[in-house]
Amino acid sequence: MVSSSATFCAFVLLASTGVALAQEGTTTGVAPVVPVAYSCDPNVCKAPACMCASKLPPGGLDPKKIPQFITLTFDDAVNLPLWQVIQNLTAGWKPNPNGCPHSSTFFVSNQYTDYSYVTALHSLGHEIAIHTVNHVGNSPAAEIKASQEALNAFAGIPMNQLLGFRHPFLAFNGQSFNNLAGLGTFLYDSSMPEDSVASGFWPYTLDNGPAVGCVSGTCDGPFRYPGLWEIPLNTLVNADGSENSPMDPNAVKGGTVGGPTADEIFELLKSNFERHFNGDRVPLGIYLHAATQVTLPARLEGFTRFLKWTQDNHYEEVYWVNNQQLLSWMLNPTDLPTSKGSPTLGCNLPAKDTSNPEICDGIDNKGDGQIDVGLVENCAFPPLTYFSTCYGCPSKVPNVTEAVPTRAGNRALVPAAGCGAGVWDPTKATCVPVKRPGTAPTPAANLPIPAGPGKFTPGTAPVIPPPAPAPAPGTPGTGGSANGGGNSNNSSANNADSVTSAFSTLFAAVIGAVAAFGL
Ligand SMILES: [Zn+2]
């Protein structure tokens, strides 16, 4: 997993399907296997516990009168290089029509991840999901569980929000699905590519098995997982009607020689958008690896141009949402005008206001251009592992056998149920009330998690205490460097959300060197 060749060396040949997989979902254009027999009675399989696969939107809604959802997901390690890609990709974006920022889902593998960036992405409104600790396909339960626990502990993501999983390499089988479902803490998997021309299903539950052919994995065993959602990866379609790659789409069928041009990427995305938008409005998915964007800047330009095009041409109809928002809307489907005020597509806007205290959450809470000053700790485990966290450096690298090693200091872990509209302050071990700008819809209540042997009980968010008086300058949370921070003040930052200069610049070069190859 360390060598640079890892990016493109994981080549698996599936003899049964004739599909060659290089890395995650990069198919070589061979037709998918015929979907397995699938039947589902909507009179028996009913929301919210169950939902049949369908090409049509839920609730019997007219496809022409619903939002066009676009889900943009990223896989693998989260660190400085990925952060820079996100900053470049999203610069200048307008929010969704309901005032919420566009939101992506990040399937995070822990190896090479810098936890502070995960914290920051979550605070900005993105969904954090699981991708194993060491990027292992056909994933063992321990890899899944430890990844979830470490992201909860060191990035401060509440357990009841870590609900999604994607198999590394999109490689799955009956055992790995048994592992995932058996943990009882997951709402959905998103690992199955589907032929979006032949099938093009909305997400559905696996009560009746998979509705699409198992192109990248093996649907062996009974393969019935009541209540566990599958969010299929809708493959983009080329101009000649053939399928593109499920992930990191190429603009030219079958090859990446020289890389696609920005124009080719833009035209591919635009034509696929129009096919969805003018059709049944099945959600359009764009599934990326940040490393691919870093190494092929033309792609970044093509994606950026497409993002702007959707906002310039279909602003009122398009919602860029994360997977949890999509499922939440599907459980409470509404037409386009009603969706604008629906909590299913709601959000907590980043907690930025001059009246806020500065909290260790990756956000410029006070709105003064400085982020988490003096609060983040840098953790070094040479030669390969360097990260920063608000939750105390562990005594060793978090791993499969010990996801949360003994931690230095007295930072408190986030409650399993989070803080609702407040923000968790790990230095004070309490939920802190914060002022947020605007009046965007608040997010929906917790999504239902299917029953499983280890079922996690979300509980309710802790009661937020009344506002405390403003602390004196120099105390933790207001600046200074008293807490072993090693941060540099970001007083010259024009972009208040750019944590690049506030986080661990000390280790950035090292992290950057290894992170691009953390697929
Ligand atoms: Zn991956």
Image (cartoon, grey):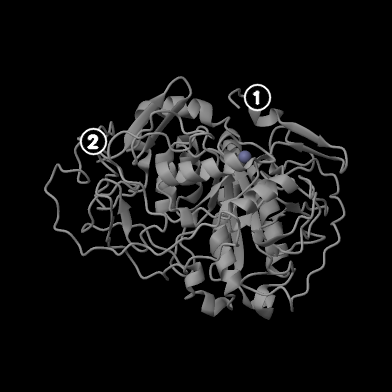
Residue at 53 percent across and 75 percent down: it is: 339
Residue at 14 percent across and 51 percent down: it is: 471
In the image, 308: left or right of 136?
A: left
- Residue closest to the eye, 452 or 489: 452
N-terminal of the pair, mark 1 or mark 2, is 1
- Residue closest to the eye, 477 or 83: 477
| Residue 388, image quadrant | top left
Question: What's the mark number on residue 483?
Answer: 2
| Residue 318, image quadrant | bottom right
**Foreground tag (1 vs 2):** 2
Structural crowding at the residue carrying mark 2, measured as other residues with C-alpha within 10 Å and reported as few (<14), some (14–19) or many (≥20): some
User: At label 2, which amino acid type do we have?
Assistant: Asn
User: At label 1, which amino acid type do we have?
Assistant: Ser
Q: Count the marks.
A: 2
Structural crowding at the residue carrying mark 1, measured as other residues with C-alpha within 10 Å and reported as few (<14), some (14–19) or many (≥20): few
Residue at 70 percent across and 41 percent down: it is: 138
Q: Mark 1 points at which residue?
A: 5
Q: Tell me where residue 380 appears, x and y as whole percent.
A: 39, 26
Question: What's the mark number on residue 154?
Answer: none
Q: Give the residue furthest to the left.
A: 472
**From this viewpoint, is residue 314 visible?**
no
Q: Quadrant of the C terminus?
A: top right
In the image, 337: left or right of 259?
A: left
Above or below for 304 versus 60? above
Q: Tell me where residue 196 appears, x and y as whole percent.
A: 76, 58
Q: In the rendered structure, are the residues bearing label 1 and label 2 in contact, judged by CB atoms less than 8 Å apart? A: no
